[in-house]
Amino acid sequence: MKRWLSMIDSTVLSMAGLRLLSATIELTAAIMMLSFNDVKKAVVVNALLAIVGPIIFIVTMTIGLLSMTDELSFSKLFWIGLGVALILFGVYK
């Protein structure tokens, strides 16, 4: 297991770890909704998830982009950043 983990790029490992954390939070929230069995409380839990999701998305993208900065030109990084901003804008508007 150790040898397998050492073969994975540390950036990819951290990005995947954040996604696993996000999945754990989502699963925990679903279990909480079922255990509360109340629509108002489920809406509150869902609202908290609406905050967590984009934060995980932004942090994961930032980690990936920072690791690729030496490979990409500034203009390409700008367009990628603009694309991420437009995704977030589209989700919230």
Image (cartoon, helix red, strand yellow):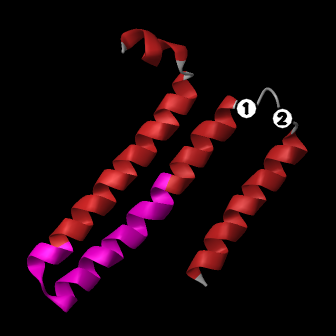
Q: Which label is found at residue 7? A: none
The residue tagged 1 is 68
For label 1, the SS is loop
Residue 76 part of the magenta-drawn span:
no
Residue at the extreme bottom: 39
Residue at position x 28%, y 60% in the image: 27
Q: Amino acid at mark 1?
A: Met
Residue at position x 68%, y 39% in the image: 65
In the image, 31 versus 79, the foreground residue is 31
Answer with left or right where residue 45 lies relative to residue 68: left
Answer with left or right where residue 9 lies relative to residue 14: right
Q: Which label is found at residue 72? A: 2
Q: Are marks 1 and 2 in contact (CB under 8 Å)?
A: yes
Label 2 crowd bin: few (<14), some (14–19), many (20+), radius 10 Å: few
Q: Position of residue 14 (x, y in %)?
A: 47, 33
The residue segment tinted magenta is 33-56
Image quadrant in which you'd find residue 41: bottom left
